[in-house]
Image: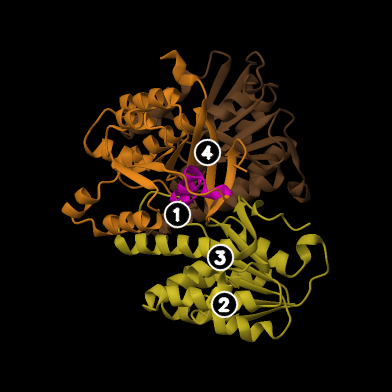
Chain colours: A yellow, B brown, C orange
Amino acid sequence: MADVQSPWPRVTLVLGGARSGKSSYAERLVDGTLLGDAPRPAMLIATADPADSARHGDAEMAERIAAHRARRGAHWATIEEPIDLATTLRHVAADARPILVDCLTLWLSNLLLRDRDVDAAIDALAVALSEIQVDVALVANEVGLGIVPDNALARRFRDDAGRLNMRLARQAARVVLMVAGVPVPVKGALPA
Amino acid sequence: MADVQSPWPRVTLVLGGARSGKSSYAERLVDGTLLGDAPRPAMLIATADPADSARHGDAEMAERIAAHRARRGAHWATIEEPIDLATTLRHVAADARPILVDCLTLWLSNLLLRDRDVDAAIDALAVALSEIQVDVALVANEVGLGIVPDNALARRFRDDAGRLNMRLARQAARVVLMVAGVPVPVKGALPA
Amino acid sequence: MADVQSPWPRVTLVLGGARSGKSSYAERLVDGTLLGDAPRPAMLIATADPADSARHGDAEMAERIAAHRARRGAHWATIEEPIDLATTLRHVAADARPILVDCLTLWLSNLLLRDRDVDAAIDALAVALSEIQVDVALVANEVGLGIVPDNALARRFRDDAGRLNMRLARQAARVVLMVAGVPVPVKGALPA
């Protein structure tokens, strides 16, 4: 996988904390409205499954997903894929629409909960991203700037999330950190 | 409230983590000493109530408040207002002194603990800020960059704090993120 | 200690969250490979003691230390000093090699666990740094951007870590914040 280190010219990584405006910014970036364009058809790969959340009684998550969906317009199509992101990305990219993946941190959490091979999954995602020919925005949480968590699982998750973000930031053309809803350029220039 | 989206040309939002230098920076911004001016009379609206903290045995908070007070000079007047920030802001602004509000995250916590309507309180604050004719610095904590908290109340607080910060950042003329005591411009230029 | 406020022209502070690429960046800064130079002999002062970690069953920490060590090349020498950083810095600086201290947050934790005088230790470190004649990179964790910890000891640690970072940032010539492996300049320019 020598090509895995090559840059991904069409990929933007949108990082931020909880309620920092990541999803909203990435949506507007992908559908073109951020720059004042008319909304263009766009594809969301959602890593949360509202049915699944509801089944497990996670009303909080289901509510958040519904609010996100209501905010997006009819020009958005949505695919839910909690696990096999690489295959879904490849499949969806054939459609030529720009893609939003929201969010990678939840995807990582899904992998860990189901005891999947995280490194292999990240490698597969990296290969898919290096081959993709459409604009992609990846949303991910920054979770490593608080106190060290007490429990080992949370520390493992925090470490894996950090490694995932570093891996993606290394090849993404653009990295943006959201601070209170304001995009701060970390790598590359802000879109303009 | 159509005007609520209008910019607040005299408002600076100072964000940062614990012990990142937010209060010190905002104090020097408001009283003019940041730019080397002679200290000008200034007004602090403190959202913590030392008497209240003492009564509830929160020695840690009382100590922190005392240290902050000692650091500020005699050119500062202080009003303690843990809840009704909008009314206090309006009242104090009539005095023409620049104002420091320290801090909004504690104010939010006060609202939640007393089961007040957070959205209504934030709306009222936004209206007051849009009408104000003096320089105002708002201090707020960034609390969303750690691991997701275990308990639902902490998650609610974290979400509300993020939404509050986004709301204020959208209209403030200037947003600064303190990193280890160093101001990093997020929106607008640093004062110079 | 009037000189303690003077700048430290050869000191870089590298801040960041967990798994944000702090150590890797600081290593490459110190041994010259960051700018494409051939690796120069360099000295690591490691504040963790792998033997100590192993003895206490902290396999996680021992593993992390081993991975860091494997990543560095043979041009690195290592001294382990969990407590008396000021003396070790002075001793090592006589050798004329550039120095990496990794990391200060763990050092602070060591001081707190052994009930040492944190303020005195930080003062002594500051004096040593103000006298040093070689390039030094200091790695430290940013731990204050999450929710307020439940337990008082964690709050104390978080506060002390914030104060330590502010103290060092005030005098360091350069402060860098790592975000997903990307260096963001906070004070001074990035090396180029």
Q: Which residue is mark 2?
A: A127
Quadrant in the rendering for residue B52: top left
C137 on left or right of B5: left
Nearest the viewer among C74 and B28 is C74
Mark yes or no: residue B104 visible.
Answer: no
B112 on left or right of A39: left
Q: Amino acid at mark 2?
A: Val
- Do tags 1 and 4 sit on the same chain? no
Expressed as whole percent of the image width and height from the top left, the position of residue B81 reads 52, 32
Label 3 crowding class (10 Å Cα cut-off): few <14, some 14-19, many 20+?
A: many
Expressed as whole percent of the image width and height from the top left, the position of residue B75 reads 58, 14
Q: SS for tag 2?
A: helix
- Do tags 1 and 3 sit on the same chain? yes
Q: Which residue is mark 3?
A: A168
Q: Give the chain of mark 1.
A: A
Closest to the camera, between mark 2 and mark 4, is 2
Picture disc at residue A144: 1
Q: Give the chain of mark 2.
A: A
Image: A65 above or below B72:
below
Q: Amino acid at mark 4?
A: Ile
Closest to the camera, between mark 1 and mark 3, is 3
Q: Which residues are magenta?
A: C16-35
Closest to the camera, between mark 1 and mark 4, is 1
